[in-house]
Amino acid sequence: MTDETIHYDELPTPIGRLLLVADAQGLREVWFENGRHRRAPAPSWVRSRAALAFARTQLEEYFAGTRQAFELPLHPVGTPFQLAVWAELARIPYGATVSYAELARRIGQPQAVRAVGAANGRNPLPIVLPCHRVIGSDGSLTGFGGGLPTKRFLLALEDRVARGDLFGLPAAGGGTRR
Amino acid sequence: MTDETIHYDELPTPIGRLLLVADAQGLREVWFENGRHRRAPAPSWVRSRAALAFARTQLEEYFAGTRQAFELPLHPVGTPFQLAVWAELARIPYGATVSYAELARRIGQPQAVRAVGAANGRNPLPIVLPCHRVIGSDGSLTGFGGGLPTKRFLLALEDRVARGDLFGLPAAGGGTRR
DNA sequence: GGCCGACTCGCCGTTTTCGGACATCGATGC
DNA sequence: GCATCGATGTCCGAAAACGGCGAGTCGGCC
């Protein structure tokens, strides 16, 4: 019988505290403490700093701007369609953005645009699976579980890092859209 | 199926290089290389000196002062109103000028003065369809896609030629307006 | 008083922008 | 099953902005 214990831990970040959840197979969930999907950890879960160290480290590096890709065992739970969408998220390069329509095309279901949006909204592993890199065809940010300001923050962070601007100076002529 | 290929070519003139564009039905566009409406030729267009020889010759004669009327197959693309305005342009005699208001009267829409101005600004066949002969009621030149200096040049050229002054000496007492 | 320039406002086709109405497809709840 | 709901996108029509203008007004200036 395998170990089915679920561990969790908190992690302070520039965008507020995150709750990390994992089982023996990998990272299961990442919540924004103030986000739309927040909820209380189940009573049966065990809080453990050590059990989540593997994810904590890479996330800290990400926010420090020294990590552009995650190498973690993941274990998101969802329908086949959702898993397909989430898997596609992982292929979006750091610092890039993609429209919901384009994402739908990439999973071979160009019509399922809204469904992709819904699946995006259910992404259990924000940041790690970069749903924040998906925006409207017209360039609008449209939505994000952690709030639009957070989405903006993440995109700005990646843009800055990708351009090698570690000081966070405003980009010349690069205003936020809409 | 008719031949829908679009050909183009360049032509050096005293007022800068012109880009000539034509299809099987006739001349479609004439651009000033430095004008307000300049743009790159579409990738599908084919550059061909021979295909535009028919227009090139007459334009060269025009600039040489030996041609006062064009006899070319034309194929300008525009709205019915625009086509009406452009057709009326062709009736303005060489060396003459007309006001926007008068032009509006001639097409039977005396109120549509500004609309005539706008249509004039969209004239796809400058020089051939002499929008440069249209000026303000008070005699001011007001505007021209290829720039006001070019408009002045063309009017001066026609004035000179019409008066038989092939040497281009400044006319006695005939200064440029405004 | 007569002339000129700056300004205002009406005119009208075109272009651009904006907003609402659908199509579309999983997921969810009954 | 069936109806409903989304972190969308496309299309269509209405409304507003925009010109290569002109006529009328109002103040200044000789």
Image: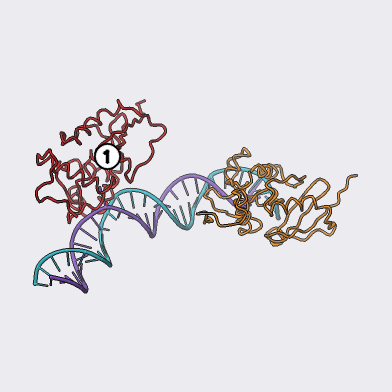
Chain colours: A orange, B red, C cyan, D purple
Left/right placement of residue B65 relative to residue B30 reads left
The answer to whether residue B112 shows anywhere in this view is: no
Residue beneath the point at 14% across and 51% down: B175
Image spot of residue B14 (x, y percent):
24, 38
Left/right placement of residue D6 relative to residue B19 reads right
Decide which of A58, A138 is in the foreground and name it.
Answer: A58
Q: Which residue is mark 1?
A: B125
Decide which of B99, B104 is in the foreground and name it.
Answer: B99
Is B9 placed above or below B142 here? above
- The numbered mark 1 sits on a residue in which chain? B
Q: Residue A108 is drawn in which quadrant?
A: top right
The answer to whether residue B161 shows anywhere in this view is: yes
Q: Residue B129 is drawn in which quadrant?
A: top left
Quarter holding the C terminus of chain B is: bottom left
Residue beneath the point at 27% across and 39% down: B125
Left/right placement of residue A9 relative to residue A113 reads right
Mark 1 falls on what kind of element? loop
Image spot of residue A136 (x, y percent):
56, 50
Q: Amino acid at mark 1?
A: Leu
Q: How many marks?
A: 1
Q: Residue A71 is drawn in which quadrant?
A: top right
For mark 1, does the 10 Å Cα neighbourhood hold few (<14), some (14 to 19), or many (20 or more) residues?
many
Residue beneath the point at 81% across and 45% down: A25
Quarter holding the N terminus of chain B is: top left
Image spot of residue B51 (x, y percent):
30, 27
Image spot of residue B110 (x, y percent):
20, 53
